[in-house]
Image (spheres, rainbow, N blue to C red):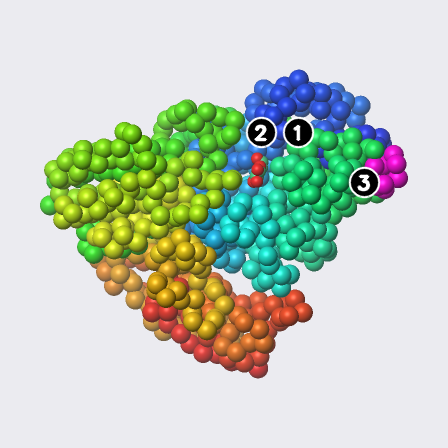
Amino acid sequence: MTRQEAMQKASELLGKMTTEEKVAQMIQVPYTIVGREEALHWASLGAGSFLHVLGDNARELQQTALKTRLGIPVIFGIDAIHGHGLNPHATIFPSQLTAACSWEPEILREMGEVTAREVATDGLHWTFSPVLCLGRDTRWGRVDETFGEDPMLAGELGAAIVKGYQGENLADDEHILACAKHYLGYGEAVGARDACDTEVTERKIREVFLPPFAKVVEAGCATIMTAYGSIDGLPLTINRRIMHDILRDELGFNGFVVTDWDNARSLVTRQHVKETIEDAAVSAALAGNDMIMTSLEFYSAMLNALASGQADISVVDKAVLHILTIKYEMGLFDQPEKKGRKDCIGCREHQDAALRAARASITLLKNDGMLPLGPSVKTVAVIGPNADDIQAQYGDWTYFSHPNASKHLTPERPYVTLREGLAALGIKKNVRILYAKGCAQLNDPSDDLDAAVEIARQADAIIYAVGDMIDQIGESKDRANLALSGRQDELFHRLSALSKPICTVLIASKPLCIEPEAAGSNAVICAFNGGMFGGQAIAEALFGDLNPAGHLPISFPRHSGQVPVYYNYLPGWHNGKYCDLPETPLFAFGEGLSYTSFRLSDLTVDMVGRTASVAIENTGNYAGSTVIQLYQRDVVSSILTPVKRLIHFSRVTIEPGQTQTVRFELSDADFALVNTRCEHVVEPGEFQILAGLSSKDEDLLTISVRID
Ligand code: BGC
């Protein structure tokens, strides 16, 4: 059904609804909080949606909803963030940040498609994904959920995963609704304190934080989630300019908006901008929130406000129309339960997709020739807290990290930790694999550094797997200190004192401060949270069965005090340098090595034909993939513009000795800035176009062009 036809049907149905039925449509009930009995009560009242409910429990609610006077089907939402992770049998993909290391929209599209199929097979309709907040202040606990620090990359990858979730037709059995979140500026809260105030101007919003949302709205994203926080003191929940004027009137969004968890009530209880829940309910609805997640008091509060004349029914009508339109467009009235595909949850084909994503995300950051491990390496010691810890490898948003699940659960097989991946390949290659944990991510009485050093002493090469753990990731887990926690640095120093080749592998939710490890290791691999086959992909890279091709979507700070550090900063007097630290990050945005080598040449820009092209040659001995990045620098502008800004990228695969020419189409948007009047304009003058395999100046070819 087209959006137009769906709107028509929705408005006919709206005409038949009582006030109570309308307000109930706006309610989203948290199943795990209220439990079965209360959930059934809400279903009989005609609640529009439930979240966090699976299988037969969901079916029972749907049946109850269908038996109400108008039989309006319920829509079920779930946090399927990197796979349908709250189902223990599901396929677990790398986290968003990890998958972003691939710089490959097709990987994200496939991740969305597989996840949608598994969610739909559980009878559900909607995932609260993707996150389009930017990971600029890496102290924030939810950096793992972002696509990294760059608006353009986040927009492209976000649009790709949205297309994967939603497919061509929302009504088909294997696709679900996407939900771009958290709108807006949530990741940029002061001090990276989760859900606190964000001190940005509207101009900055338009330059940095809005573009990824604009991109997914253009791609047809059906729903948007309101952020928890506030911008310049005004909670997003009641910010009509951002939630309505910019989102609907400017970006043309025509789906529905859902609040985040308890946003409406928090206006009273946490943010203290409303005295009563009635005031909060009316303001949230007026600002443009259509569905109210978990603030169940909204129901009676809105009914009171309507009865007393504090609110007009038109505000409710608008919201319900948005919700019903999507329900019609999804075909829910013909078929309330998605069927999905029988036996597809965690099936082989889906596992293959997770493995492809994990492989594409492996990012090699340093290599003095230690890797790939050569034939002289007969014994490998794999050491460290994250070498054999599947929970750390999965990261946030899988069933055992969910607040309602037990941390002590072990996920279902198959999954492969780094230790297991190395063991499996070791058998094939006749290499002995030894293991010792050494220490935990946090100080623990069972830490045994001596034992780990003894194991390492027996090996020809050491693989040291460091990182964080579930308790250090996610909402309200912001970190003031990004150094490796517990005794991980101490263990590194003891291992490196053995003077054996050592490769540090970062299995973590985000960039941690690993300067000592980076300086003292022969090789460094960034694997972040690689999902079910993360360990296998790392092992393949270590042995050279996989040629790494990931590139960082986020900068690595040298020290917690350097944060925030991102490549597209505005020029200042001292280049952002501290007197006790180099101004550069430890590893830069866009960085990523390969076992082969590449040479870029012949950067040309044709301003008439609006194209840029660059040649890339594989000058090494292995076939390999890499990411060509095109940046722009506005040489003189009326307002500060970033020292460089990513405008295009392309992941290419090249055989040894071969050369490819990569072409990019240029558009006005590539040269535009947001001026002091908040307009997107191209200012005439000189621009530089830069092309390279990282954002570092020394890696970039540069050409000047003029726009008159
Ligand atoms: C998070 C959202 C999530 C929602 C539902 C909130 O706490 O901020 O990202 O989708 O809970 O679980």
Relative to residue 96, is residue 308 drawn left or right?
right
The residue segment tinted magenta is 305-313
Nearest to the observer: residue 6 or residue 239: 239
The vertical placement of 38 against 141, above or below, is above
The residue under the point 35% across, 62% down is 581
Q: Amino acid at mark 1?
A: Val
Name the amino acid, label 2.
His
Cα–Cα gap, marks 1 and 2: 9 Å
Task: Name the residue tied to disc 2.
Answer: 52
| 81 is within the stretch colored magenta | no
Where is residue 442 drawn, in percent x and y?
Answer: 35, 36
CA–CA distance in space, label 2 to label 3: 26 Å
In the rendered image, which quarter is residue 305 located in? top right
- Say which label, 2 or 3, has the lower sequence index: 2
Q: Identify the residue position indicated by label 1 in the image.
A: 29
The x, y position of residue 655, in whole percent, is: 28, 57
Q: Which residue is mark 3?
A: 317
- Which picture quadrant has residue 277? top right
Image coordinates for residue 420, horizontal then vertical, percent: 27, 33
Q: Quadrant of the C terminus?
A: bottom right
Q: Is mark 2 within 8 Å of ligand 1?
A: yes
Q: Secondary structure at mark 3?
A: helix
Whether residue 385 is visible to the viewer of this picture, yes or no, is yes
Q: Residues within 10 Å of mark 2 (few under 14, many from 20)?
A: some
Q: Is residue 114 left or right of residue 24?
A: left
| Element class at badge 2 | loop
